[in-house]
Image: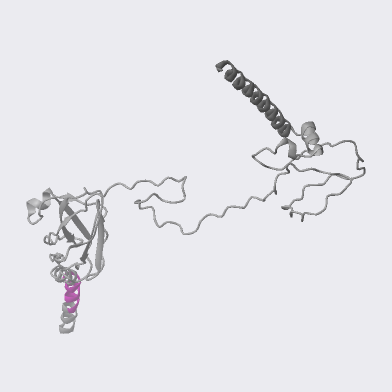
Amino acid sequence: MAIGGLLRLICFLLVLGAYVAPAAAQTVTSSFTVVDTIPPAAITDLRATSITEYSVTLAWTAPGDDGTVGTATSYDLRYATFPITSEGAWAAATQVTGEPGPHASGATETCMIIRLTAYTTYYFAIRSSDEIPNMSALSNSPRVTTLEEGPPVRPTPTSSPYPEPGSDAGPIPTSVPSVEPTPDPGPEPIATATPDIGPGPTPTGTPEPTPPSTPPVEPTPGPTPSSTPTIEPTPSATPIPLDLRSPEVIGADMTDSRGHGASIWVWICLGILGLLTVGLVFRSIRQWR
């Protein structure tokens, strides 16, 4: 009987343990649940690294997920024309879209804000948050003034290879475009007339000279061939007296040279006028007496 009662007691305890053990284990597990209440650390080195007329580039040091440990989840960057140092100013500021994702704690983050107004003062502020999300405190609020618009650049005409003086088109080229030289066709042939001084032997079988492609070399003066006598007119502004000229030259000039023939007629006319003048003078003297 004692052994049977002991066995029944052992079976009762085993059955009781099967029902009690799961409930006890669940109670212990729930008692160790951890809730994340630590926000990322506040950013204190927000600064501008590049400024133009219409954009500002900001940089800061990444915080952590819990204070300065871990990696945060997101950033909230805002700007305004007034200091962002309170919750009311933060709510009234303009939120930037497209902020970069956070990196590990201690990394340097950068972001460019565009479509700003030239020569305007802006204030910036940033916050980070974790996955809960726990929001960090406000960062410092740096003051940045965009640059003033510069004068418009005057376009340089494309028809000239050199920029106009005072323009910003760049350095003046130091080389001049080469120009292909035009080949020299040589001196133009000059037609000269040879006066006809009477019948004479006509040269036959003599080919006409061809103009050379290069400038001809003036020949050395020499004796004129007897078969073709040529009399060159003497260039002189003062006509030669009639009695000093040879009959051959006078005949040649009157026959073929228009210029010398005209000068002879001028002398004849002057002689006639001289005779008329002398006659009139003698007539006047006779009448006066």
Image spot of residue 62 (x, y percent): 21, 67
Q: Is residue 137 magenta?
A: no
Residue at 10%, 51% (x, y): give it.
Answer: 82
Front position in the image: 24 or 52 = 52
In the rendered view, would you say 265 is above or below 84? above
In the rendered view, would you say 279 is above or below 39? above
Quarter-of-image position of residue 250: top right
Residue at 80%, 31% (x, y): give it.
Answer: 255
Q: Which residues are magenta?
A: 10-20
Residue at 87%, 45% (x, y): give it.
Answer: 207
Front position in the image: 99 or 182 = 182
- Quadrant containing the N terminus is bottom left
- Quadrant containing the C terminus is top right
Main SS of the magenta part reads helix
Quarter-of-image position of residue 220: bottom right
Front position in the image: 52 or 233 = 233
**Left of 152 or right of it: where is 126?**
left
Front position in the image: 157 or 219 = 219
Image spot of residue 195 (x, y percent): 80, 37
